[in-house]
């Protein structure tokens, strides 16, 4: 396939990482492919019964027109059995192979999971890890977070774990931001932990909001769970608690709080007025 034997052998023992952002390497899509993709996505996400025959038609048209986003959604829906195919496993792998041929980082990540489960290809954990690592190095945030979890228990890999999570966090990955905050808190690096949780809230992590709500409530170092060496601020704590409830309530819709710094900016910024609404 597209991974060398050396890459497969050293996927998880190469303890260095340079942050690359996926958006910097993705190809520009034609307006036609974008329109077809957006319509397929609209059909998929709108409320009510789903017409997967129609959804499939527009995803296939968008994929044929060059949309890597349509390709990703198409092979996922085929593998889940939601879109019919005369040869689902081969079609899925063909689509993923086409993404890899274009050096789309997500293609490597998706192939990693198919190798991990043995869907359409021979199950091979070592090769799967090599694909995950390649996707991470090319800038895929999901892969960066995934590989960081694979490396987390390796003593000498702590810096790589942090670097990968930070890179994914900076690309809007909520779970990576939350995990970055947890990792830094465990090391008593509180300012970085707080930054991680703030990024987590911005990108939809209710757990991050919960930690910050607790952090602005306690000044007791013995309260290990919520201590961040912050000054107590009841209003900040209340606002984060409201945000936590909002994110939890609408989790199924993938909510985010892009205006978090206008609602609860981190100290020393002053707390602005807030009417309790979200963008």
Image (tube, rainbow, N blue to C red):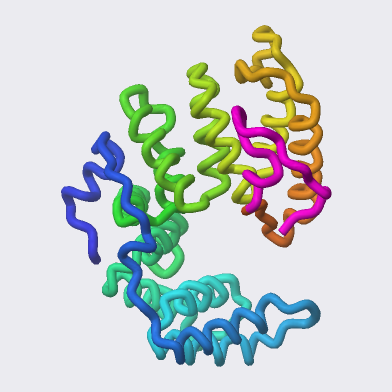
Task: Tell me residue 65's x, y (percent).
Answer: 40, 90
Quarter of the image for residue 159 reads top left
Q: Is residue 244 visible?
A: yes
Task: Tell me residue 180's x, y (percent).
Answer: 50, 34
Quarter of the image for residue 41 reads bottom right
Left or right: residue 251 compared with residue 94: right
Looking at the magenta stretch, what is its main secondary structure?
A: loop
Residue placed most toward the observer, 119 or 227: 227
Look at 73% across and 54% down and name the residue there.
251
Task: Tell me residue 62's x, y (percent).
Answer: 47, 87
What segment is highlighted magenta in the picture?
259-279
Is 142 covered by the magenta stretch? no
Look at 48% across and 92% down and name the residue there.
61
Left or right: residue 26 compared with residue 234: left
Q: Say above or below: 37 vs 260.
A: below
Look at 62% across and 44% down and name the residue there.
261
């Amino acid at each position: 396939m597209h991974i060398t034997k050396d890459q497969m052998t050293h996927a998880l023992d190469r303890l260095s990482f340079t942050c690359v952002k996926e958006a910097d390497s993705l190809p520009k899509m034609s307006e036609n492919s974008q329109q077809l993709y957006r319509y397929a996505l609209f059909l998929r996400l709108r409320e009510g019964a789903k017409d997967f025959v129609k959804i499939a038609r527009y995803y296939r048209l968008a994929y044929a027109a060059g949309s890597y986003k349509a390709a990703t959604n198409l092979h996922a829906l085929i593998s889940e059995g939601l879109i019919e195919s005369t040869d689902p496993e081969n079609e899925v792998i063909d689509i993923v192979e086409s993404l890899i041929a274009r050096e789309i980082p997500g293609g490597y990540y998706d192939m990693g999971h198919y190798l991990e489960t043995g869907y359409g290809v021979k199950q091979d954990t070592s090769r799967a890890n090599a694909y995950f690592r390649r996707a991470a190095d090319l800038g895929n945030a999901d892969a960066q977070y995934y590989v960081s979890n694979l490396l987390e228990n390796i003593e000498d890999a702590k810096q790589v774990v942090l670097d990968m999570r930070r890179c994914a966090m900076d690309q809007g990955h909520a779970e990576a931001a939350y995990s970055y905050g947890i990792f830094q808190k465990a090391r008593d690096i509180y300012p970085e932990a707080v930054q991680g949780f703030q990024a987590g809230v911005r990108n939809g992590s209710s757990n991050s909001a919960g930690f910050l709500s607790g952090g602005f409530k306690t000044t007791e170092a013995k309260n290990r769970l919520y201590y961040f060496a912050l000054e107590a601020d009841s209003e900040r704590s209340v606002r984060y608690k409201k945000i936590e409830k909002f994110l939890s309530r609408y989790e199924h819709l993938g909510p985010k709080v892009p205006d978090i710094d206008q609602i609860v900016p981190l100290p020393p910024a002053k707390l602005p007025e807030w009417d309790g609404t979200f963008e």
